[in-house]
Image (tube, rainbow, N blue to C red):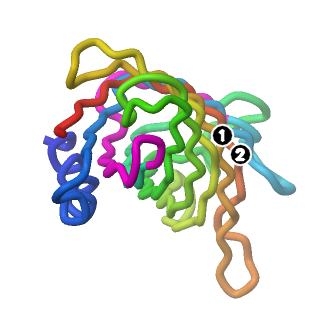
């Protein structure tokens, strides 16, 4: 159910734009992520996350055979596996939802169906912390990926994503730390045109 909701949220705006263009729907089904928190006095300095299942859905419309516009929705729940000087509470995120816009730039002339791509991204991440507030933080990053065709209308894909998420503050007091994340994701893409 969560997967269908995320797919609809990611694909609706892109579908309206892409009435006569190549269109792609994708989902990430496995992810490994490492997060390093920034700033002083962190009870948890880093965290790891491993997940299997629909972690992200995205929809892309192609402006040309090399360039696409993509919206992604990513959701992570119970991100508790902390490493470092962790006391088991405070800054480890228990849930995270991100809405990201990116521009995948494909090296090959395949309309995104195969080959290597680079995708600068910008978005908003909403974190709900275990011992603190819920916050929204601006994020930017870069995805490097490769698609392996498995049929004319489908591809298996692997991605590496480096993302920086800014801190959040209220009245000059930092309510959520900045962090840098590096993740690897495996997923599938389906091409509708």
Residue at 72 percent of width and 36 percent of height: 46
Q: Residue furthest bottom?
A: 171
In the image, is residue 143 above or below residue 99? above
Whether residue 99 sits left or right of residue 80 in the image: it is: left
Residue indicated by mark 2? 180
Mark drawn on residue 162: 1
In the image, is residue 71 above or below residue 105? below
Q: Nearer the viewer, mark 1 or mark 2?
A: 1
Indicate which disc, 1 or 2, sits on the residue closer to the N terminus.
1
Is residue 105 something that shows in the picture? yes
Q: Where is residue 124 in the image (x, y as percent from the top left)?
A: 50, 63
Q: How crowded is mark 1: few (under 14 residues within 10 Å), some or many (20 or more)?
A: some
Is residue 49 something that shows in the picture? no
Q: Does the residue at mark 1 contact the one at mark 2 (Cβ under 8 Å)?
A: yes
Residue at 49 percent of width and 65 percent of height: 134
Residue 60 shown in magenta: yes
Q: Which residue lies furthest to the right in this view?
A: 40
Q: In the image shown, does 116 or 179 lie closer to the viewer?
A: 116
Q: Magenta-highlighted stretch: main secondary structure?
A: strand
Q: What element carries label 1?
A: strand
> What residue span does the magenta drawing correspond to?
47-67
């Amino acid at each position: 159910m969560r997967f269908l909701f995320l797919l609809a949220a990611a694909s609706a705006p892109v579908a309206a734009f892409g009435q006569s263009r190549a269109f792609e729907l994708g989902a990430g089904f496995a992810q490994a992520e490492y997060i390093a928190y920034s700033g002083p006095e962190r009870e948890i300095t880093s965290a790891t996350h491993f997940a299997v299942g629909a972690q992200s859905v995205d929809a892309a419309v192609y402006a040309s055979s090399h360039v696409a516009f993509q919206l992604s929705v990513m959701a992570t729940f119970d991100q508790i596996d902390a490493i470092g000087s962790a006391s088991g509470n405070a800054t480890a995120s228990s849930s995270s939802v991100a809405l990201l816009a990116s521009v995948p730039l494909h090296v090959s002339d395949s309309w995104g169906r195969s080959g290597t791509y680079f995708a600068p991204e910008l978005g908003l991440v909403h974190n709900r912390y275990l011992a603190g507030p819920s916050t929204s933080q601006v994020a930017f990053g870069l995805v490097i990926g490769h698609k392996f065709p498995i049929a004319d209308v489908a591809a298996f894909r692997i991605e590496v994503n480096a993302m920086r998420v800014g801190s959040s503050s209220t009245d000059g007091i930092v309510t959520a730390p900045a962090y840098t994340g590096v993740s690897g994701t495996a997923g599938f893409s389906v091409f509708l045109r």
